[in-house]
Amino acid sequence: MSHSTNRRQRLASILSATAILAVGLAPISAEAADHLDAPTAASMGAADINDVYAFSTSDSARSVFIITVNPGAGALPNSTEYFGSGVEYNLTVDTDANAAPDITYSLRFGNPSGGTQDVTIWRNGTRWGSGMTERNITLSGGSKLWAGLRDDPFFDLDAFKGNILGAENGRMLCDAQKVDFFLGLNVSAIVLMVPNSELGGNGQTVGISANTKIRKGGEWIQADQMGRPGISTVFNNRLVNGDNQVNYVKELFNRVTPSEQDNLGFRKNVVDTLIAVSTKFGAPYTNAQATDLSRVLIPDILTYETGNKGGFLNGRRLKDDVIDTLLAVGANTPGASDCIGNDSTFLKSFPFLGTPN
Ligand SMILES: [Ca+2]
Ligand SMILES: [Ca+2]
Ligand SMILES: [Ca+2]
Ligand SMILES: [Ca+2]
């Protein structure tokens, strides 16, 4: 398939999604790792976290954290190619396994001007550095920041949602279409690289989570949050919440902190989904097995051992096929796959993400 044909098909697919989003008649079929995961987040791409990554550099000396926002940046409705100037972007690190942040990196952006934006980063409330998007920013202590437009490293969740969760999008695992919805689309990305000494040294297990906040009535209100990929999308679903409740549940998930999730019933959603999906695959989990797994998945925090290059579930590398992993876990079926793999070419060095499409 030529590049231009591919491009046209992509645009056709985007246009049909646009129509769905515009009229709001059908469930959004494109919600992915955490792209477009709830109505409020989907209505403002700049505050809609798509994915969170945490991985080791090849020399195991530094750790890289990435947050992507703006699903289909500039191509899908409600998204732009810029960060929101009224949005706070936070990446939190829990260093003592109590699900409460010990380090918070916060970023804010100025209005776009000439294709770039001013960016400022704070560490635990203290201003750490500033610069411009689309270029490297050197921070004290050997850390580095980059923010700007990049290729979306995520690959598909459409078939998982259709086949497994009954999202009525007509997709089946490994079907003939193999629509990789976010192929050829961009995101706005924040890339922060820190020496492992910043996180307590090598071999430290830390918990990573991201959230966005928007300014409303003089206060910062949390608009989105995520840790591991697909947790809200996969486990807060129609199957276990019903059509009427599902959006309420997804909105609530985005507004609370990870440590509040268990008490609010989100772990029960995980247990119920694990049992329903594994039963569908003829390999049903017992209640005890599903409960054990739910204690790993909630609170929704991406655990990562510094210096460990193993990849998901240890942190998350850009190329990791996290949807296949979630499928295998959900279906209690090792090796299960949606037959869609990584579609991006990554840089070998900072800022690692592929160049924009
Ligand atoms: Ca999101
Ligand atoms: Ca903590
Ligand atoms: Ca979310
Ligand atoms: Ca896959």
Image (spheres, helix red, strand yellow):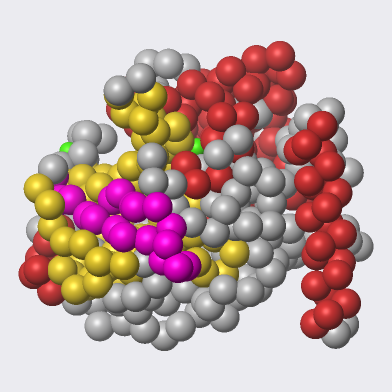
Query: Which residue sits at x=31%, y=45%?
Result: 90
Report the side of 301 relative to 168 (left or right). left
Q: Nearer the viewer, residue 151 or 317?
A: 151
Quadrant of the snapshot with the N terminus: bottom right
Residue 122 within the magenta-colored segment of the rendering: yes
Ligand 2 positioned in quadrant? top left
Image-quadrant location for residue 337: bottom right
Q: Nearer the viewer, residue 293 or 254?
A: 254
State the image coordinates of residue 229 (x, y, percent, origin top left): 51, 49
Relative to 126, residue 297 above or below = above
Query: Which residue sits at x=34%, y=52%?
Result: 109
Quadrant of the snapshot with the C terminus: bottom right
Image-quadrant location for residue 200: bottom left
Residue 212 within the magenta-colored segment of the rendering: no
Report the side of 6 relative to 205 (left or right). right
Query: Which residue sits at x=45%, y=35%?
Result: 224
Residue range highlighted in magenta: 107-124
Image-quadrant location for residue 214: top left
Report the side of 74 relative to 279 (left or right). left
Q: Nearer the viewer, residue 38 or 280?
A: 38
State the image coordinates of residue 81 (x, y, percent, origin top left): 54, 59
Relative to 263, residue 343 above or below = below
Residue 299 in sight from this viewpoint: no
Relative to 280, residue 197 above or below = below
Relative to 182, residue 136 above or below = below
Query: Which residue sits at x=53%, y=24%?
Result: 251
